[in-house]
Image: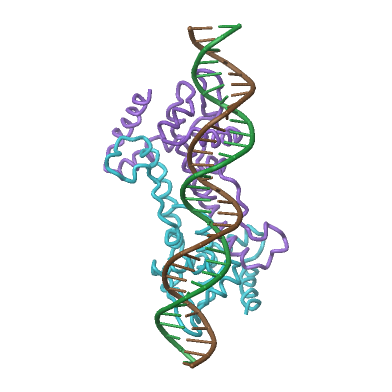
Chain colours: A purple, B cyan, C brown, D green
Amino acid sequence: MRLTTKGRYAVTAMLDLAFHSQTKPVTLTDIANRQTISLSYLEQLFARLRKAGMVKGVRGPGGGYTLSREAHQINIAEIIEAVDEPVDSTKCGGKSNCHNDQPCLTHDLWMGLSDQIRSYLKQISLGQLLERDLVSEVAHRQGQHSERVIDTLALKERKSA
Amino acid sequence: MRLTTKGRYAVTAMLDLAFHSQTKPVTLTDIANRQTISLSYLEQLFARLRKAGMVKGVRGPGGGYTLSREAHQINIAEIIEAVDEPVDSTKCGGKSNCHNDQPCLTHDLWMGLSDQIRSYLKQISLGQLLERDLVSEVAHRQGQHSERVIDTLALKERKSA
DNA sequence: AAATACTTGACCATTTTACTGGGTTTATTT
DNA sequence: AAATAAACCCAGTAAAATGGTCAAGTATTT
């Protein structure tokens, strides 16, 4: 499990999509404008998200993207893994001749950590992120009330329309 | 909190150091050989780890590096943060004029996740990683007994001497 | 003094990231 | 039917990060 800006872009875009696609598909152009991510980069990311079966593309005017599952059925780990190239982090490439090499031991220790993080992110759904749990937590960190955060989202929706 | 190969290298090297520096300082050359990391790259990493106060350099013949704290007093999060350039992941650079921008809202949602991961890694010490907890967990995943894993470490120590 | 070992800085190749720009298909709207 | 709006596709590419090299130091111990 790697955590890079790429994964953050993907999660950000999915959050935006989950929030705005309640009624109708959302165009990548809209997401690009709201989140200040380049359109073509979003296309790359969504090509992977689509192949991973997390979003559905609707062509033609009035089209865009929608979640192919409910927001609570999509977890953060799978979003990140969908866009992240699976890097072979072993030196030996997983060859079985590597049983007694110390690099592979420490590598395994690291992988153990990585797995812990993955399973943690697997427990968190897009829906949860949007709902009170983390929103209110963030709001608290910012010394705001969660109503205000929600208002902010609604405000932006109108502004970008 | 980013999780990249750089952080993995640092944790790997610190694990090696913690294990081999029980009695005397360990040279970066030794770590480089055992872990197949380039010496110069290790030098870069350890320069940061030293500035972060996690290791001490001992100059002169017989010198090398030692932990400046006990292995149980060093957590994984601080190792990673020591070598990771703190990337400003906000678009607005944390300016206060950004209160109502949605990029900052989703950014904050992401940061909330990131904080969770950080605090998780903060709970895990180098010492724990070396001891039974995670070693046996890894050994279990590999279908081995932990004795065998420990043996592997000892084996390498002799081999590289 | 000599050997060892850390320090520092400049440099560089490769890979990944993030983006640009050109298409093509599909579906809607007029 | 024509225009249009959108996904979808693909080749290229600039910028950044990664991982590494080289060289000239400085400090310490023997």
Indicate left or right for B144 with A21 as reference. Answer: right
The structure residue drawn at horizontal position 40% and vertical position 38%, both measured from the top left corner, is B106
Residue A72's place in the image compared with B134, above or below, is above
Indicate left or right for D28 with A159 as reference. Answer: right
- The image quarter containing residue D21 is bottom right
The structure residue drawn at horizontal position 63% and vertical position 70%, both measured from the top left corner, is B147
Residue A83's place in the image compared with B141, above or below, is above
The structure residue drawn at horizontal position 64% and vertical position 78%, both measured from the top left corner, is B158
Residue A61's place in the image compared with C13, above or below, is above
Indicate left or right for A106 with B2 as reference. Answer: right
Where the C terminus of chain B falls, by quadrant? bottom right
Q: Count every numbered label the image shows and give the total.
A: 0
The structure residue drawn at horizontal position 54% and vertical position 65%, both measured from the top left corner, is B12
Instruction: Give x and y (percent) for residue B136.
Output: 58, 63
- The image quarter containing residue C3 is bottom right
Viewer-side residue, A55 vs B136: A55
Viewer-side residue, A98 vs C2: C2
Viewer-side residue, B4 vs A18: B4
Viewer-side residue, A17 vs D20: D20
Instruction: Give x and y (percent) for residue B25.
Output: 49, 79
Instruction: Give x and y (percent) for residue B38.
Output: 57, 67
Instruction: Give x and y (percent) for residue A52.
Output: 60, 36
Residue A158's place in the image compared with B31, above or below, is above
